[in-house]
Image (tube, helix red, strand yellow):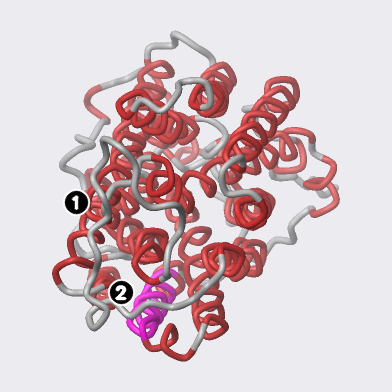
Amino acid sequence: MESRPFGERSSSRTAVKQMDDGSPSRRVPGFCSLRCGLAFLLHFCNVSMMSQRACLSLTMVAMVNGTGPQGSPNTSAPEPLDDVKNPVYNWSPQTQGIILSSVTYGMLITQVPVGYLSGIYPVKNMVGSALLLSSLLSLLTPLAAGVGGSAVIACRVAQGLSQGTVLVAQHTVWTKWAPPQERGRLTSLSLSGLMLGPSVALCVTGLICQALGWPMVFYIFGAGGCALSLCWFLLFYDDPEGHPCISPAEKEFIASSLVEQAGSAGKSVPIRAVLKSRPVWAISLGCFAFSWTNHVMFLYLPTFISSKLHVNVRENGLLSALPHLCCWLLGILAGHVSDGFLSRKMLSLLAVRKLFTALGLLLPAVFVVGLLYLGPGFHGTVACLTLASATLGFCVAGMVINPLDIAPRYYGFLKGVTVLIGMTGGLISSTLAGIILNQDPEAAWSAIFFLVAAVNVSSLLFYLVFAAADVQAWAQERQLTRL
């Protein structure tokens, strides 16, 4: 590392101390700052990416011959769609499950390599190019569906490769742009787009399917993603030092807050120490449970609503969007509340991470199990489904951001590892759910929801025992002294 003059080091430490003490003279307003604007930009990029991913779970209802029994007393019958605007394919429930989960196969491949490369190569190029590729593949999806189910699977796997790159590489942005005392709110603001995206997609997908046909869903979301990727290339810079629009005060504020944080570029990753770290495994199992639950609710919620509540595709979309919208709100709220706890010193950093992880994993388990004992009531079913998905948003202020606490130098690589393990849970749960539904559609939901509860509770117990929030020894910079 480059040595600093003694006076410069002292002034930097003084600046950090002033920020820790909450000195207003050193603070730059957060909401009107450039870093907050970039968080919003990344938020909308995530909305676009997840809209492209989520729309298939609802268009699948219009793309296939049927997903469950039709007709029920006191419910609105599904309205037939125009076969010209909405081509129909004869895909079995098992094939549908593979198609819905195929995007995860691509995401699995990218996690660790992208996590490592994001600490070396410009994040601007990685995120922008990957978002553009995902958008182009969305535009090609209707053509692939006409070729066959295998072509759709191949298209979705490639889309998973690009979306996995965006998902992991974006975390490295905050190692250079987020002051430590704002990590919760900036991270929750950007990542909450992952939760708003499905809500937006499900709200409008049903309407588009009925008015224009399901192929237009992929064309609209694909075109929107192409436009956002252009905005990303124009507006984002990897480092605050090089951004032409940042104010000198904000640049100094960010630089002084991160002065003692070392980067990992050009440094070897201590892989053996990472694999032996119990806090890393605690986060990984938390991500495993989060993805297990999220994929089941994310991919099969429209199917559950269609089979149990027997609503038309427009109502299905609106009902399926409600949980994701509430999850988006809770995710943003969790980030602000967690930073509030820390700034007021009401709870320790470790207590905050454990609290929000517990809320984000335990509450969904309670609500999905409760769903099985409510009976056929419409309002109770919708309430439980909404709360089961929405309370996952608490995890954003818990184990989702926890890797930045324990290893800021290797944050990108660590996110790649933990997200990889998490995606494995999502892949297993979505594929297994499709198999269970194929065998016994009527009794399948009990098995699926009990598995969700078991995975969440067991992973949470491990996290509560072994989680940490201090920088681990293997992630600290080693000082070498020469005689």
Is tag 2's residue or tag 1's residue first in the polypeptide sequence?
2
What is the quadrant of residue 88 in the picture?
bottom left
Residue 308 circle label: none
Image coordinates for residue 427, horizontal then vertical, percent: 64, 57
What is the quadrant of residue 135 in the picture?
bottom left
Q: Residue at x 56, y 75 (%)?
A: 157
Q: Amino acid at mark 2?
A: Phe
What's the magenta bit mostly, secondary-structure-wise? helix
Q: Residue 184: within the magenta?
A: no
Asked whether, in this view, residue 95 is left or right of residue 90, the answer is right
Asked whether, in this view, residue 203 is left or right of residue 98, the answer is left
Image coordinates for residue 304, horizontal then vertical, percent: 45, 45
* Secondary element type, mark 1: loop
Residue position marked by numbered label 2 in the rendering: 218
Q: Whole-Å distance between the Cαs marked 2 and 1?
A: 39 Å
Mark count = 2
Numbered range of the magenta stretch: 127-142
Residue position marked by numbered label 1 in the rendering: 247
Query: How many residues crowd around disc 1 within 10 Å: few (fewer than 14), some, or many (20 or more)?
Result: some
Q: Amino acid at mark 1?
A: Ser
Image coordinates for residue 89, horizontal then vertical, percent: 44, 78
Quarter containing the N terminus: bottom right
Query: How many residues crowd around disc 2 within 10 Å: few (fewer than 14), some, or many (20 or more)?
Result: many
Against 86, residue 342 (above or below) is above
Q: Nearer the viewer, residue 410 or 232?
A: 232
Asked whether, in this view, residue 313 is left or right of residue 211, the answer is right
Asked whether, in this view, residue 411 is left or right of residue 132, the answer is right
Q: Residue at x 50, y 86 (%)?
A: 148
What is the quadrant of residue 183 in the picture?
top left
Q: Between tags 2 and 1, which lies in front?
A: 2
Q: Residue 130: within the magenta?
A: yes
